[in-house]
Amino acid sequence: MSAPPPTLRLLVCGSADRGDDGAALNAVAHVLPRLGPEVRQHLEVRRCIQLDANDLIEVADDEACLVLDTVVGIDPGSVVELDLDALADRATVAARSSHALPIDQTLGLARAVRGTLPRGLFVGIGGKWFGFGQVRSRALRDGMAAFELAIEAAIASLAEPVPA
Amino acid sequence: MHQADLRFQVQNLTRVEGEGSLHLLVRDGAVAEARLQIFEAPRYFEALVVGRTPDEVLDIVSRICGICPVAYQMSAVHAFEDLFGVTVDPATRALRRLLYCAEWIESHALHIYLLHAPDFLGYPSAVELAQDHRQLVADGLRLKQIGNRLLALLGGRAIHPVSVRVGGWSRAPRRRQLEKLQPDLHEALRLARATVDVALGLKPPEFEREPRLVALHHPAEYPFNEGRIVSNDGLNLPAQGWGEAFHEIQVPWSNALQARGSDGLPYLLGPAARIALDHGQLHPLAREALDASGALESIRTNPYRSIVARAIELVHVTAEAIEIADGYEPPAEPAVAWQPRPGTAAWATEAPRGLLFHRYEVGDDGKVAAATIIPPTSQNQAAIEADLATFAPRVLDLPMDAATHALEQLIRSYDPCISCATHFLDLTVQREARA
């Protein structure tokens, strides 16, 4: 018997070797074993070091999406949850370099190409240290339990397909 | 009659890699100065590699750029192997060309579709472009994705790859892994050929000049990692010999050193130079596309046609990638053994934006004692300024916004990577009347 198709794609962003940037990877590693198999079977987990428009464009129409990352601009260790559309509509500081699009433009590009963004959420935790080889900051470590709870709650709210 | 002072100012040029500004001084209706002001602080990579082993250098220099990290690794690894007398497995040589193909695919797709096409089609960015031309942007993103996937397979990750080592690789891919990518690569070739049609349909502003063009040239293949440094005015040097014909100077308005020929004149690197000097070595499918386009001459003389040159090169790299992947047999060992020796290691390869030269002094301890890295954008700065000065009089009578946009578009034609050179753009045009 084949497994049912996933209904929720987790996009786990960040680098484990860059201090607080690896928070989402760490949190997912803790959260997944706590989920029951009836929830886990609905999940498709993908790592993306840096969120790319294609990561969102490829989400199937009947799939929801949960984007997890460490963020700056909020207190380190605090947790933020935003609807993907709301995040796309937020004005962020204009990027001067095209090496990396800011997340609102990444989402905006995906929305323009895809027609709509997938149903979904962004859950982030404020980070402080992002240097290569750095350890995670105390502030972030203090916020990890709340981050994991927020991820679990987001999975619970998104994993069930929306009735047609 | 005295004309009033006039300043054009663009605080931050968008859709280029990095940060900087442009200052134009117009005196009595003539352009007196055209300065590309690169104000980002120097990044000190040449100091960071001092005291490091060659393999450490490969990982460090790949951090110079998120778009063309392979270029930095390739110039460095070939420089060290040349000094140390290392002969790599033919499969490694082919894989390194494939790695460069991957980088050119993602870099050229990014520039054509997301950075440059919005200029021609009248959109402020790819986001707005995608709202009206969804498939066009989707195709560009797909091409970029395929390049990144190939890069991740060969390099260990798509950005700042880590698998290149002196003598070969830390891990060579399996044949089956490359076979699995073939459908993607064939799709990329189809998209690349369509990209040529897209680029040819974009009407360039009228502007012709006769630039001095410099690129690597190899008799049997389109230049990536090997070849001689040649120019359209007769230069012909080994890849180690950049310093025999070129030198760097410091100008007060740029944190990136500028490069000039020994005659003090600017020169241009990049896709247009390669197409002009190396079109005979293009893959037959790319050569066919170039011939059908009839654009060879305009690519050489009109900088706005660089978008066509990139599209032609996209056909080349996707077609070559298919052939390399198809014929791939893994090397017997990921890397051959080597021993460091003291001396000067120098080499040039072709980054997506043009010739990238590295020179390292290796000490008796096998570690780097001094380094010089000369990226293509810093070499192109003087040519960009010269073209801006030539082109600007054509737009000074336009409304401010239109003039500014035309100048920005010209700069974007060179696909400057200021974060490599160091960083870039904010435009000021100042008009002064003579007393």
Image: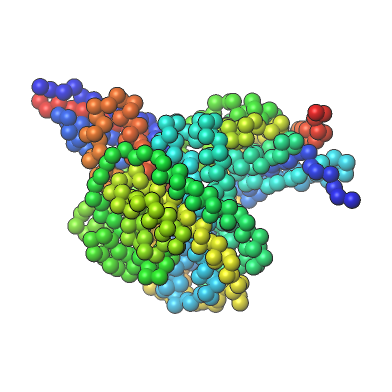
How far from the left and from the top, in percent, is residue B165?
A: 54, 67
Say which of A133 and B21 sits in front. Answer: B21
Residue at screen point 41% across, 59% down? B287
- In which quarter of the view is residue B175 placed? bottom right
Residue at screen point 69% across, 40% down? A59
| Colour convention of the picture | rainbow
- Lateral position of residue B117 relative to residue B156, left or right: left
Quadrant assignment for the C terminus of chain B: top left
- In which quarter of the view is residue B409 placed? top left
Say which of B216 and B205 sits in front. Answer: B205
Residue at screen point 28% across, 39% down? B206
B384 shown above or below B213: above
Residue at screen point 57% across, 59% down? B155
- Lateral position of residue B236 relative to residue B27, left or right: right
**Number of marks in picture:** 0
How far from the left and from the top, in percent, is residue B243?
A: 29, 63
How far from the left and from the top, in percent, is residue A99?
A: 49, 43
B379 shown above or below B426: below
Say which of A62 and A29 sits in front. Answer: A62
- Lateral position of residue A49 relative to residue B211, left or right: right
Q: Is residue B5 visible?
A: yes
Quadrant assignment for the N terminus of chain B: top left
As drawn, the residue found furthest toward the front would be B292
Say which of B136 and B344 sits in front. Answer: B136
Q: Is residue A136 visible?
A: no
How far from the left and from the top, in percent, is residue B123?
A: 45, 31
B103 shown above or below A74: below
- Lateral position of residue B345 relative to residue B207, left or right: right
